[in-house]
C-alpha cells in the first residue's frame, strides 16, 4: 500500500467481493501528533469510513479519553447493530500508522502498519473537511463522557 486511499480502496474492494460476508465490527486505530482540531477531524473521517465499511448509519457514540490526554477511543453503534471502535493515540509511532481489523460474519480482514515505509498522505491530508454533524457528535461525546445519540438526544 502506498497511500491511505489505496488502503481504503483495498478494504472497500474486499467488502464488495463479499468474501467476508456481512461486516459486523471495525477497529480503526491511528496515531499522530496533530493539533486538537486536527485530531477531531481525523476521528470524524475515520468514523465515517468505519460506518461506510459497515454499510450502516451511525446511531450512537461513546468517547473515552481526551485529546489533551493523548488518547481517544470512540465506541460507535450503528442503527443496524454493527459496531466499531475508532482510536487515536498521540505519538510518533512507525510511519503514519493506521491499523485496521474488520470482522464479517464469514471472515476477517487485518491491516497492521507494522514496519512498512511511511505513506505519502495521512487522514489529516484530506482536502475534504469532515462532516460537521459527525464533528459535533464527537465533541459532545468527548465533553459529556456518556453515550451520545446521532439524533442529538442521549
Image: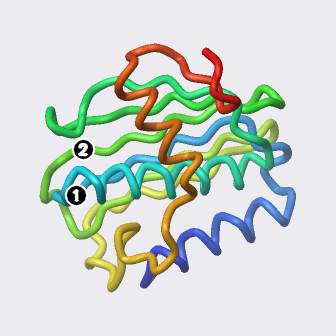
Q: CA distance from mark 1 to mark 2?
A: 7 Å
Out of 66 and 94, give the one closest to the viewer: 66
The image shows residue 57 at horizontal and vertical percentages of: 76, 41
Relative to residue 140, is residue 46 depicted above or below? below
Q: Quadrant of residue 12?
A: bottom right
The image shows residue 100 at horizontal and vertical percentages of: 49, 51
The image shows residue 107 at horizontal and vertical percentages of: 73, 44
In the picture, measured across the screen, residue 64 lies left or right of residue 105, that is: left
State the residue at coordinates (46%, 41%): 86
Q: Which residue is mark 1?
A: 32
State the residue at coordinates (46%, 14%): 146
How crowded pointer 1 is (Cα within 10 Å; few <14, some 14-19, many 20+) is rated as: many
Among the two numbered marks 1 and 2 on one chain, the one whose residue lies closer to the N terminus: 1
Q: Quadrant of residue 95?
A: bottom left
Label count reads 2
How crowded pointer 2 is (Cα within 10 Å; few <14, some 14-19, many 20+) is rated as: many
Q: Which residue is mark 2?
A: 89
- Image quadrant holding the C terminus, namely top right
Label 2: element kind? strand
In the picture, measured across the screen, residue 113 lies left or right of residue 51, that is: left
The image shows residue 5 at horizontal and vertical percentages of: 53, 77
Q: Quadrant of residue 115?
A: bottom left
Label 1: element kind? strand
Out of 136 and 46, give the one closest to the viewer: 136
Amino acid at each position: 500500500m502506498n497511500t491511505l486511499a489505496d488502503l481504503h480502496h483495498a478494504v472497500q474492494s474486499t467488502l464488495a467481493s463479499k468474501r467476508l460476508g456481512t461486516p459486523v465490527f471495525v477497529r480503526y486505530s491511528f496515531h499522530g501528533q496533530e493539533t486538537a482540531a486536527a485530531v477531531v477531524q481525523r476521528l470524524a473521517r475515520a468514523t465515517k469510513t468505519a460506518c461506510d465499511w459497515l454499510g450502516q448509519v451511525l446511531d450512537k457514540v461513546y468517547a473515552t479519553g481526551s485529546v489533551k490526554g493523548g488518547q481517544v477511543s470512540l465506541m460507535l453503534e450503528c442503527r443496524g447493530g454493527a459496531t466499531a471502535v475508532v482510536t487515536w493515540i498521540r505519538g510518533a509511532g512507525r510511519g503514519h500508522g493506521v491499523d485496521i481489523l474488520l470482522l464479517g460474519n464469514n471472515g476477517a480482514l487485518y491491516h497492521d502498519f507494522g514496519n512498512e515505509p511511511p505513506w505519502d498522505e495521512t487522514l489529516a491530508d484530506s482536502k475534504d473537511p469532515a462532516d460537521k454533524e459527525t464533528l459535533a457528535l464527537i465533541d459532545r461525546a468527548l465533553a459529556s463522557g456518556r453515550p451520545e445519540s446521532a439524533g442529538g438526544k442521549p
